[in-house]
Image (cartoon, rainbow, N blue to C red):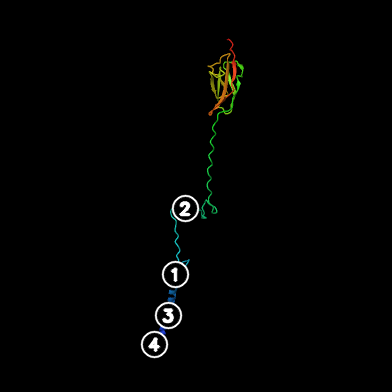
Amino acid sequence: MSWISERLLLAATPLLAAVATRKKTVSKKSAKRPAASKARARPSGTPGTRKPTPVRPSGRAAERGKTGRTKAGRHPASKGGESAPSPKPPPPPPPPAPRPVAPTGRAILLAPINGQYTDSVYPKFRWLSVGGATRYQVVWSEDPNWGGTLSVLSIATEAAVPVEKPLRPNTIYYWRVRGGNDAGWGPWSPSGSFRVLEEPAA
C-alpha cells in the first residue's frame, strides 16, 4: 500500500501546483480590479469631488451670446475693454429769422423839381428809393396842410398821376412820398411844390 500512495502523490503534485498557481493569479487580478474601478469612477480633479455639469443658456441669453460677441469673446462695440462712445447730441436748432422792420429812411424827391413849373397836367413823380422799402405811397394836394389829398400807391421807383384825374393848370401843388414794406410804413419825405403851366389855347 505504501508504493501506491507514493505514486498517487507523485501524480497529484502537478495538479496541486497548478491549482496553487491559479489561485495566486486570481487573487492578484481581484486586487487590481478595485483600483481600476476607482480610477474609472474618479477621472480627474480632487479625489472625492464631482465636476459640475455646465448649464447651457437658453432663449434670449443664448441669442445674446451668439450675436453680441465676436469670436475673440469681446463685444464688437468695445476695443481693449473700453466702452462704446456715446452718440453726439443733435445740433441746436437755427435761430428764428429776424422779423422785418419798417423803413427808416426818407425818400429824396427828384421831379417835378421843387418850386419849378411842369409843362403837363399829367406829370410823373420820381424820387430816390428808400432802403428796405418794397412799396411807396405818393400824395399830392393843392392845400399845403394836406386838405383834400389825392394819393397813389406804387411798387416801382416812380409813379404817374392817374389819367382820369388831370392836374389843374396854373395851380400850385404840394407832394411827398414815403416807403413801406410788410412791417409798415416809414416816415414821409420833406414835401415839395410845383406849378402846372396853363395849357395853350388850341
CA separation, marks 2 and 3?
69 Å
CA separation, marks 4 and 2?
89 Å
* Secondary structure found at label 2: helix
- Mark 1 or 3, closer to the camera: 1
Q: Amino acid at mark 2?
A: Arg
- Residue 199 on image: x %, y %: 58, 12
Residue bearing the label numbered 2: 64
- Mark 4 or 3, closer to the camera: 3
Residue bearing the label numbered 3: 20
- Badge 2 crowding class, 10 Å Cα cut-off, few under 14, some 14 to 19, many 20 or more, is few
Q: Earlier in the sequence, mark 1 or mark 3?
A: 3
Q: Can you say which quadrant of the picture contains the C terminus?
A: top right
* Secondary structure found at label 1: helix
Are circles 4 and 3 on residues that touch, CB within 8 Å? no
Residue bearing the label numbered 1: 38
- For this orientation, the residue located farthest to the left is 1
- Badge 3 crowding class, 10 Å Cα cut-off, few under 14, some 14 to 19, many 20 or more, is few
Q: Earlier in the sequence, mark 4 or mark 3?
A: 4
Q: Amino acid at mark 4?
A: Ser
Q: Amino acid at mark 3?
A: Ala
Residue bearing the label numbered 4: 5
Q: Which residue is at a point 40% across and 83% down the rendered structure image?
A: 12
Are circles 2 and 1 on residues that touch, CB within 8 Å? no
Residue 65 got which mark? Answer: none
- For this orientation, the residue located farthest to the front is 145
- Mark 4 or 2, closer to the camera: 2
* Secondary structure found at label 3: helix
- For this orientation, the residue located farthest to the top is 202
